[in-house]
């Protein structure tokens, strides 16, 4: 708002044509304004506004600006001047140049060119960005591990993963062709969580890359997931430092997620004690947030807080309101995966099923439990 | 006069307190005097999103009646823009090159730098996601993003006789459908991970839009079949597509590129998976809620990412061919007739995949195209990186069916006094135009 005031002040200095920046009232962002162009300017349409007021990205040293288009936008004719409204908001940190070429007015004696160079300061914070966490959190991972999740402390920019994230082999050198280069980097919408897949072509038995190169990881060996500081955050800054996660490799897991082997510890009535599920094997961290829900007897989903720990083998649910006595169930999504991509209905790559079996639509699984009155409540 | 004028401006600048660089120049015989001072005005800005329905702009396809479909990953949607006559410009008289002499032309040089200037940014902040050609105007449309983070601003940019123009979406009849069909609500808690479906391909066929993609969580092979005009979420079909390996295993994978073709009168989907197999499905089997297992008919070869998949008709032998461009090596070309008849991989025994069970019938074409699309029966358009300049992308033409350009090869025939067995000199004035 201070900027508007400044432009107003300009009028006090006479009625010479002037260039300035003002807030785009009625829209969002900023626009470029040329005022005091000529008496009755706005009343005569058909001026060559496109050549009167132009806004461009200012290249350093004015290098070869010929042939580069102006910034895309609209000109709005006003009473005494013209406003340029960019189609897309001006980007922070980019230098711009507005050029007011008064020769376009076609008035004799008025043949000057004014330029205004401006930029918008990029919002910044002193806190540097770093890798906060990597999942799976365990450091013993199966040979057919499918994916990692990397969580950053700030939103990031895409495009740097292939060059900055790699697996180092047992010899400490980069192990080639272990990670999958996805056609689109797999960020979540906040761009703080990046999914890294190991090469599915090498994980799947019998597929070409697997036959040529073998599986990405070898049992009994030690590897390191290395995230280089060249990952850029949304403000354009590299990470404060790189991040590594070392892990050893155990046997492949090629079985469905065994819900029958889960341990369930129901809570006691009246408390807001957590319901606890323990899994025999680590499950996929991200999918555990939505893949398991608690439902009342009527099937209504219950709201509460989820805690995932012990290397993603323990899932606890603390309801928002105390448990009532009665029957509940844990509903498990048919798509819930473990760290190798196995689901409750089948392994990541498993034997060919009959057409009938594979056509069956998988339903969610249900684990019933009861909340009973605790005897001690009356003790 | 001049001096007092300048002095006046200096005073204003000081009062403004902006430290504004405001230059004044007198135009003399058409020379422009620019400003030269050091500090530019610095203003604090508030980040804003671009207006309009798009949150991002990715894979695109044209449908009937000038409808442009745009995949929008950030917005979890596929949009349909029904372009009006005023949104399209027939590209009449645009020069395409010399077909006989394998010489394409540059339609736009420095495409990335020019897009950056158009969108008000620097060349390294521009991403070109897809390119499609409108028929019959032969106008080229690009889906572009400014920025690579949460501040991404999408744009559809069209090429008009060598000039770039932003397609103004305001006013274009628009509809959309959510993809995935249950977009993730806001995460309940700050640290709860959100699901994103990264749309990889959008294709229109016979009244439906087919959408493929990769989830950032599930390793799923979900394909969406959505009737167009969009009639509401309930009409969307969700199909899980599996492929067999070796006749022994079956497995799922996200589809990266898809193509729909009639095979002996029945429409089929050809899908390229990220893990390299090329799989064929009858569309009739892709029903809502189904898990469908297709036929693996080949593999594209290890370590490569398919970029574009399209068919073209060879103007010499008049046969249809499939072309798949690949990021790290030559493109693959396969006759469509071979695709249609290729047997599914045999069960048991040694498998000769090649690259691909179609390996023997596959040809490699030395195309370095980041994006490719068919313009007309004799020409394709490509976006490729200039070999010498780190960041320069060019948009140009290349002849069909060899996708070969003499400019990029060293040959004695390119010398003015070199041998001319293919009679280049005789044909050198024959320039194709739209």
Image (spheres, rainbow, N blue to C red):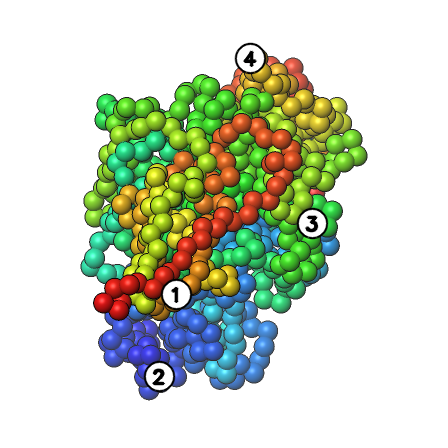
In the rendered image, which quarter is residue B212 located in?
top right
**Which chain letter matches label 3?**
B
In the rendered image, the quadrant that contains the C terminus of chain B is: top right
In the rendered image, the quadrant that contains the N terminus of chain B is: bottom left
C-alpha distance separating marks 3 and 1: 50 Å
C-alpha distance separating marks 2 and 4: 82 Å
**Which chain letter matches label 2?**
A
C-alpha distance separating marks 3 and 4: 39 Å
Image disc number at residue B208? 3
- Residue receiving disc 4: B350
Asked if disc 3 and disc 1 are in contact, CB closer than 8 Å, the reply is no
Give residue B25's position: percent from left, percent from top: 36, 66
- Residue receiving disc 1: A325
Give the mark toward the camera: 1 or 4: 1
Secondary structure of the residue carrying tag 2 is helix
**Residue at screen point 26% across, 61% down:** A124
Give residue A213's position: percent from left, percent from top: 41, 20
In the rendered image, which quarter is residue B352 located in?
top right
C-alpha distance separating marks 2 and 1: 69 Å
**Which chain letter matches label 1?**
A
- Regarding residue B381, the answer to whether it shows in the image is no
Give residue B174's position: percent from left, percent from top: 63, 63
- Residue receiving disc 2: A8
Secondary structure of the residue carrying tag 3 is strand
Give the mark toward the camera: 3 or 1: 1
């Amino acid at each position: 708002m201070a900027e508007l005031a400044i432009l107003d002040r300009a009028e006090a200095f006479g009625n010479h044509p002037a260039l300035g920046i003002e807030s785009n009232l009625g829209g969002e962002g900023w626009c470029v304004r040329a005022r005091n162009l000529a008496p009755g300017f706005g009343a005569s349409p058909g001026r060559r506004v496109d050549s009167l007021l132009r806004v461009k990205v200012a290249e350093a040293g004015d290098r070869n600006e010929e042939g580069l288009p102006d910034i895309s936008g609209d000109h709005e004719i006003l009473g005494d001047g013209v406003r340029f409204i960019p189609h897309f908001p001006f980007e922070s940190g980019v230098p711009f140049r507005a050029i007011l070429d008064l020769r376009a007015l076609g008035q004799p004696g008025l043949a000057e060119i004014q330029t205004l160079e401006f930029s918008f300061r990029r919002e910044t914070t002193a806190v540097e960005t770093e890798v906060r966490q990597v999942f799976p959190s365990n450091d013993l991972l199966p040979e057919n591990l499918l994916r990692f999740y990397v969580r950053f402390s700030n939103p990031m920019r895409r495009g740097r993963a292939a060059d900055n994230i790699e697996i180092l082999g047992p010899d400490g050198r980069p192990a080639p062709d272990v990670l999958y280069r996805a056609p689109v980097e797999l960020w979540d919408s906040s761009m703080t969580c990046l999914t890294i897949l190991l090469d599915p072509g090498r994980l799947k038995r019998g597929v070409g890359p697997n036959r040529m190169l073998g599986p990405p990881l070898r049992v009994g060996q030690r590897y390191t997931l290395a995230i280089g500081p060249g990952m850029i955050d949304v403000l354009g800054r590299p990470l404060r430092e790189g991040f590594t996660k070392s892990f050893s490799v155990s046997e492949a897991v090629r079985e469905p997620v065994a819900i029958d082997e889960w341990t369930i510890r129901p809570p006691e009535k009246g408390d807001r004690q957590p319901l606890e599920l323990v899994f025999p094997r680590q499950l996929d961290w991200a999918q555990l947030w939505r893949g398991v829900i608690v439902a009342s007897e009527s099937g209504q989903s219950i709201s509460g807080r989820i805690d995932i720990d012990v290397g993603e083998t323990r899932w606890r649910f603390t309801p928002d309101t105390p448990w009532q006595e009665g029957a509940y169930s844990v509903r498990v999504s048919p798509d819930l995966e473990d760290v190798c991509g196995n689901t409750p209905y089948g392994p990541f790559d498993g034997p060919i099923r009959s057409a009938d079996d594979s056509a069956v639509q998988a339903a969610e699984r249900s684990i019933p439990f009861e909340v009973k009155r605790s005897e001690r409540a009356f003790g | 006069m001049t001096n007092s004028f300048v002095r006046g401006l200096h005073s204003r600048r000081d009062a403004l307190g902006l430290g504004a660089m405001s230059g004044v120049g007198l135009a003399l015989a058409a020379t422009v005097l620019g400003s030269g001072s050091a500090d530019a005005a610095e203003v604090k800005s508030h980040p804003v999103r671009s207006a309009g329905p798009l949150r991002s702009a990715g894979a695109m396809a044209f449908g009937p009646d000038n409808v442009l479909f745009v995949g929008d990953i950030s917005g979890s949607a596929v949009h349909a823009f029904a372009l009006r006559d005023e949104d399209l410009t027939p590209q009449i008289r645009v020069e395409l090159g010399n077909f006989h002499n394998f010489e394409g032309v540059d339609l736009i040089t420095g495409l990335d730098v020019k897009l950056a200037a158009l969108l008000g940014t620097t060349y390294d902040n521009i991403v070109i996601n897809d390119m499609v050609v409108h028929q019959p105007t032969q106008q080229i449309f690009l889906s572009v993003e400014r920025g690579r983070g949460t501040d991404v601003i999408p744009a559809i940019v069209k090429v008009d006789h060598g000039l770039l123009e932003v397609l103004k979406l305001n006013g274009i009849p628009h509809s959309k459908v959510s993809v995935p069909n249950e977009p993730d609500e806001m995460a309940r808690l700050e640290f709860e991970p959100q699901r994103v479906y990264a749309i990889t391909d959008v294709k229109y066929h016979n009244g439906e839009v087919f959408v493929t993609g990769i989830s950032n969580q599930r390793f799923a092979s979900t394909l969406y079949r959505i009737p167009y005009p969009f009639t509401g979420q309930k009409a969307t079909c969700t199909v899980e597509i599996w492929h067999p390996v070796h006749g022994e295993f079956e497995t799922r994978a996200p589809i990266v590129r898809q193509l729909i073709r009639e095979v002996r009168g029945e429409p089929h989907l050809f899908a390229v998976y990220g893990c390299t197999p090329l799989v064929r499905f009858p569309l009739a089997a892709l029903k809502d809620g189904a898990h469908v297992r297709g036929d693996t008919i080949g593999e594209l070869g290890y370590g490569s990412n398919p970029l574009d998949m399209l068919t073209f008709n060879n103007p010499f032998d008049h046969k249809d061919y499939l072309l798949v461009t690949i990021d790290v090596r030559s493109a693959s070309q396969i006759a469509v007739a071979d695709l249609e008849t290729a047997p599914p991989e045999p069960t048991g025994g040694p498998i000769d995949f090649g690259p691909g069970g179609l390996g023997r019938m596959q040809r490699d074409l030395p195309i370095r195209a980041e994006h490719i699309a068919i313009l007309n029966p004799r020409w394709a358009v490509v976006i490729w990186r200039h070999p010498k300049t780190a960041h320069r992308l060019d948009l140009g033409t290349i002849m069909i069916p060899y996708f070969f350009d003499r400019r990029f090869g060293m040959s004695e025939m390119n010398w003015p006094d070199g041998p001319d067995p293919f009679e280049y000199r005789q044909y050198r004035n024959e320039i194709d135009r739209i």
